[in-house]
Amino acid sequence: MKNIFVLLFISLFVFGCGKKEENKQAAAQSDTSAVLKTVPDDAPPKDLDLVYTLKKDQHLTYKLTSTTSQVQSVSADSVVKNAGSQTVSYIVDMDVKEVDNDKIMDIKATIKWAKLDQEANGQRISYESGKLKDPNSIKRFVDYEAVLNNPFYFRMSPKGEILEIYRVDKIVDKYLDIQGLKDSVNAEQKRQFQGNISEGALKPLLQQIFRSLPSNKVAKDSAWHFDYPSRMGVFDIQNIAQYKLVNFEKLQSNDNRLAVIEAGLQIVSKGKNKVSQGGVDYDFKKPEAQGSGKIYFNVVKGCVQNSKTSTKMQMSVTVKTSRGPRGPMKAVRNDNIQTTNLLQLIAS
């Protein structure tokens, strides 16, 4: 399941039939961008509390597209370069089932459509949901097939904290069934699998759609940040996500107020950069990463309208050994990775 939401990040939608279905197909196929038609907000608020204010029985549909490109070079006796790119798109339905007295929202999420385009060293791979008939092809793309039209549920706070993800059993059952493993996994293994899917695939997807919001009221030029840890190879990473409310605008189509937020990312890495194993010495350079983007939060609807964020990452490792087939050997590997995530609210 590790490739489900590469993140990078995803989204179609089924709402009815007839003409509405045609509109959904058009939304899936269209070339989209994060550009909104807006007008200046002539009477912006002095301050406001950014919160998710979804209502019971409310329906949202998001499209999330993640594009990742990677260039890798390995320098030894000669220099070998490899390049690849991947674009993954999903359309996700969100249906609000309950909102309690603390404004905690219970939401059903259903991935209705997925599309993959991948290219590496001249080889291309393509996938689109609903078009596979051959069992071997379905098995090849099991990561995508398992989540399609299999709803899961989650609880979220008004500030965007994902409190719980539950009822993912149908996704697990379909995955195991496609792989022919349904009768060979015990109950404990199945529970672990459900946890891995929830935390490793579904939660990152939801966090792209429902971003964490500041705890205090904000105004134009207000800034805030969130810190969160991660692991990258031998390094412990402290990610610092930075935000600033730069302006208020209004949608040209319906006069909804938008809070325009600029986003940035920095990282701080710690760890032992030199490791020896099996007669091979590894010298890791501290990774570098930068991020930027813009988020449009619809104050009237109480949800993200659009966002476009990008990250760039550079990693390098030097490998040395005295046991090469021709004596001592040294190689340097450099990786440059760029990811862009585009989120769009296409129905509400």
Image: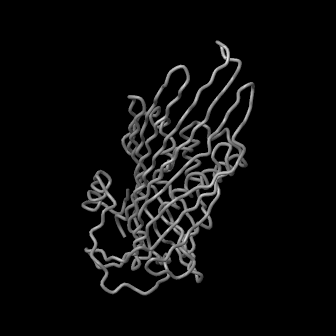
Q: Position of residue 159 (x, y in %)?
A: 55, 74
Q: Going by the picture, which residue comes out furthest to the top?
A: 326
Q: Which quadrant is the C terminus positioned in?
A: bottom left
- Image point (51%, 66%), residue name: 211
- Image point (42%, 32%), residue name: 120
Q: Is residue 3 above or below residue 105?
A: above
Q: Nearer the viewer, residue 70 or 176?
A: 70
Q: Position of residue 158 (x, y in %)?
A: 54, 76
Query: How many discs mark residues in the rendered view?
Result: 0
Q: Is residue 213 above or below residue 274?
A: below
On the picture, is 282 further left or further right than 298?
Answer: right
Q: Position of residue 148 (x, y in %)?
A: 46, 50
Q: Position of residue 300 (x, y in %)?
A: 39, 80
On the picture, is 246 further left or further right than 30?
Answer: right
- Image point (30%, 57%), residue name: 27
Q: Nearer the viewer, residue 259 or 209?
A: 259
Q: Which quadrant is the N terminus positioned in?
A: top right
On the picture, is 92 further left or further right than 32?
Answer: right
Q: How is the image coloured?
A: one colour
